[in-house]
Amino acid sequence: MGDPGPLIAFEGVEGAGKSTQLELLRRALEGRSREVVVTREPGGTPAGERIRALLLDPQVELHPRAEALLFAAARAELVENVIRPALERGAVVLCDRYLDSSLAYQGGARGLGRGPVEQVNRFATGGLLPDLVVLLDLDPADGLGRRAGTPDRIEAQDLAFHRKVREAFRDLAAAEEVLRNGYRQLEEMGGTGPRVNVATLLARVVLLRGRNDDAEEITRTCERLAAPDQADAQVKWRSIRAMAVARRGDPGEAERLAREAVYLVGKTDQLDSRAEAHLDLAEVLLLGGRGREAEHELGRAIALYQEKGNEVGERNARRLLARSR
């Protein structure tokens, strides 16, 4: 068996031109004698197409969580029955939408947050991520104006919803740019202090993108570079690794790391950092199914954010608290 093929996902708002650009790439690749598999989301399998019909039916009302789970279910079928087998035989797979669409539509515009959506999709895909994401950016008003016929359930959402989708896509793209720049800076810069700061930032961004193994590996660089008296760095690498470890299914080790972070930052007067450590511990506990203990940690985070006067942090903690109940 030869080398596995690449997975290329095309993303963007409604009417951005994904299908057109995907078809152009397909023709170019086939002109070079490459096997190309083209598919779409939701759909691409018998079960996926039936889920697609339900998701796009204007007469159907769905809670955002139900919508997210249906998209993930269709994606699970597509990965196992179409995408993964094609990649294993060396084909190029071109997918009209993939994980970033769930992050933008359900995580962003529907307000579910990236974390829960990433978590369920990591399970659904077995951790399969695209080798390349092509984001086509367009004003949603222009994109919706291109559509012909009766709008489906997603297209029929108001313009404010579609603008939130675009904003979420652009945030994801900006995070990828931070990631690339971070890797480059780590390679180029000298001095342990600046390097550990960049490494912790990079690990956090990688974690947000669902790349848990990479995040855990970067925290090992942080652990190696951070001096014992660099409290902020010692706390951050533990919190980030705790989340990565929790997501790969080791709740005991994850809790140990998160509680170490809470203990270390508790010795400082950095209220925001202390609140964030409690917030991270709460997320680890939630991933382990321990909602009551997570609520206690979130209460401590909220109190610290209030003492600091950090309204944004307090809102984020309260949002997580609402989801935990």
Image (cartoon, grey):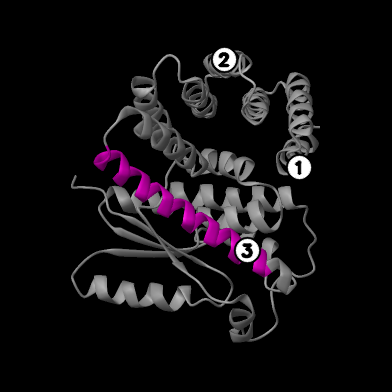
Amino acid type at mark 1: Glu
Amino acid found under the numbered disc labelled 2? Leu
10 Å crowding of disc 1: few (<14), some (14-19), many (20+): few
Label 1: which residue? 311
User: Compared to 63, does 315 lie above or below?
Assistant: above
Residue at position x 62%, y 75% from top? 140
Q: Are marks 2 and 1 in contact (CB under 8 Å)?
A: no
Tell which circle, 3 or 1, labels the residue nearer the N-terminal end.
Answer: 3
- Report the front residue among 212 and 55: 212
**Seen from this angle, which residue lies furthest front?**
269
Residue 1 position, x and y percent, is 19, 44
Discs 2/3, front = 2
Magenta span covers which residues? 162-189
Q: Which residue is mark 3?
A: 165
Provide the secondary structure element on which disc 3 rests.
Answer: helix
CA neighbours of label 3 inside 10 A, class few (<14), some (14 to 19), many (20+):
many
Q: Quadrant of residue 148?
A: bottom right
